[in-house]
Amino acid sequence: MKKARMKSKAMLAYSKNVLNKMSFDVILFKKELTKACKNLLAEEVDELMKWVQENFGAQYVLQPIPVKSK
């Protein structure tokens, strides 16, 4: 379980890095954000959305936020 958690945290960091690089284009950013949301745990999606809001503003936040199906 710890290994999965560490891998997930690494995915969150990777997603933030990719999103930083894609911030020049809102459409491309949202595509990458959608991909990231599908690959993260629910609490990490929340953390990522807060990070997006704080760093890039409301125009970059997905509406509605995609939820990973189980």
Image (cartoon, rainbow, N blue to C red):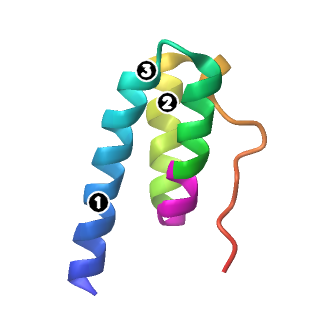
Residue placed at 29% from the left, 78% from the top?
4
Q: State the image quarter where residue 49 is shown.
A: top right
Q: Which residue is mark 2?
A: 52
Residue kind at label 2, given as amino acid type? Val
Would you say 23 lies left or right of 35 here? left
For label 3, count other residues whose C-alpha is less than 10 Å away and answer few (under 14), some (14-19) or many (20+).
few
Dots 3 and 2: beta carbons under 8 Å? Answer: yes
Stretch of the chain drawn in magenta:
36-42
Q: Quadrant of the C terminus?
A: bottom right
Q: CA distance from mark 2 to mark 1?
A: 16 Å
Q: Which residue is mark 1?
A: 9
Would you say 26 lies left or right of 55 here? right
Relative vertical location of residue 1 with respect to residue 56 in this rendering, above or below: below
| Residue 55 disc label | 3
Would you say 70 lies left or right of 19 here? right
Q: Earlier in the sequence, mark 1 or mark 3?
A: 1
Residue kind at label 1, given as amino acid type? Lys
Q: Main secondary structure of the magenta part?
A: helix
Q: Earlier in the sequence, mark 2 or mark 1?
A: 1
In front of the other: 6 or 50: 6
Q: Residue furthest top?
A: 24
